Amino acid sequence: KEMPNYVWDHYERSVPMSTYLVAFIVSDFEVLRSTGTNVAVWARQEAINQSLYSLDIAPRILHYYEEYFKIKFPLPKIDMVALPDFSAGAMENWGLITYRETAMLYQKGVSTSSNQQRVATVVAHELAHQWFGNLVTPSWWTDLWLNEGFASYVEYIGMDAVEPDWKVLEQFVIHELQNVFTLDALASSHPISIEVGHPDEIGEIFDRISYGKGASIIRMMDHFLTTEVFKRGLTNYLNAKAYQSAEQNDLWAALTKQAHADRVLPADVTVKQIMETWTLQTGFPVVTVIRNYKT
C-alpha cells in the first residue's frame, strides 16, 4: 500500500549467489562508463580521471576470461569502485567490485610502473573471482584455495593478455613460486586444504600458502595436463557447478574426466591421486642432483 514520504525501488532479480558477495554502495562518487561494454568505474570526483587505466583494461580482461573459460559473464553489468579507505585491498562482490584507491587508480606520468602493474594485477585478480568464487563457491573455508589460488594464477594470464610486453608469466616464478618455497619450508606452514573449525581460524588461512602455493600447484596442473585439456576441464567444472558450491574433489573429477578423454593420463591414474599429495600435506619434495663431470 502507499506509504507517505517513502519511495519504492524495484530491483531486478539477481542470480543465485553466496551472501558474502552481496554489496551495496551509497556515495556521491563520479562515474565513467566504457563505451560499448557493461563496465563502469566509480571514484571521488577529484580522482575519477585516475580510473581511466582500470576502465581500459577491465573490459578487455573480462572478455579474455569469457573466451578462456568459454563461459559468458552472467551479469548485465560490472561496476568497479575506488574507496578512499578500504582495509581489505579489494573485494570481488558480484557485479560490484570494491578496491582500495591504490589498487584501482593510476595516473600516467605521476604513478610508477610498479603502481601500474599493481593495478592491473588486482583488477585481473578480482575479475577472475567472478568465475572462481562467484559463479562457483567453495563449500567451506577448507577449500578457500579454490577461490584464491585460481584467481592468483589466472590473474597472470589475464594481465599477459592486455600487457604482453610486461612478460608477467615469466614473473610468476619470482613473485609466487620462489616465495612459496621459502614459506612452505617453515615449521609454521600448513596444507593448502586445511580444516577450519572456528571463526578465528578463517582469517589465518588468507595467506601466501592459500594464494601463492595454490596458484603454483594450479600452474603445475596446467603444465602436466597441457593447457588445452586443463582449460576444457575447468570449463566442465564451472558449468557443472555453476551457481552452486563445490569442493576440491569436484575439481579433481572434472579434470580427470577430461584428461582421460584426451588421453593425457593413463586410465588408472587420477588427478586426485596426483594433486592431493600437494594439497593435503605441508612442504614440498626436495630433489638433489649431483652432476658427475667424469662420465
Image (tube, helix red, strand yellow):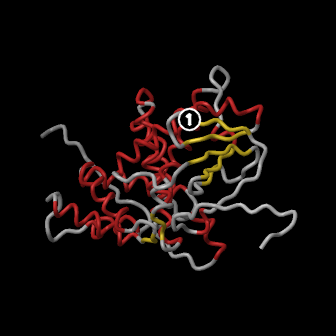
| Residue type at numbered disc 1 | Ser
Q: Position of residue 199 (x, y in %)?
A: 65, 75
- Quarter placement of the C terminus: top left
SS of the residue under disc 1: loop
Specify whether 295 is left or right of 116: left
Residue farthest along the top direction in this orientation: 109
Does residue 199 lie above or below 254 as drawn?
Answer: below
**Viewer-proximal residue, 52 or 168?**
52
- Quarter placement of the N terminus: bottom right
Q: Position of residue 223 (x, y in %)?
A: 28, 50
For disc 1, the marked residue is 34
Give residue 264's quadrant in the image: bottom left
Specify whether 194 is left or right of 55: left
Residue farthest along the bottom direction in this orientation: 197
Q: Position of residue 23 (x, y in %)?
A: 66, 59
Mark 1 closeness class: few <14, some 14–19, many ≥20 residues within 10 Å: some
**Viewer-proximal residue, 160 or 199?**
160
Residue farthest along the right direction in this orientation: 5
Q: Residue at x 35, y 71 (%)?
A: 250
**Viewer-proximal residue, 189 or 2?**
2
Does residue 48 lie above or below 81 as drawn?
Answer: above
Q: Residue at x 83, y 63 (%)?
A: 6
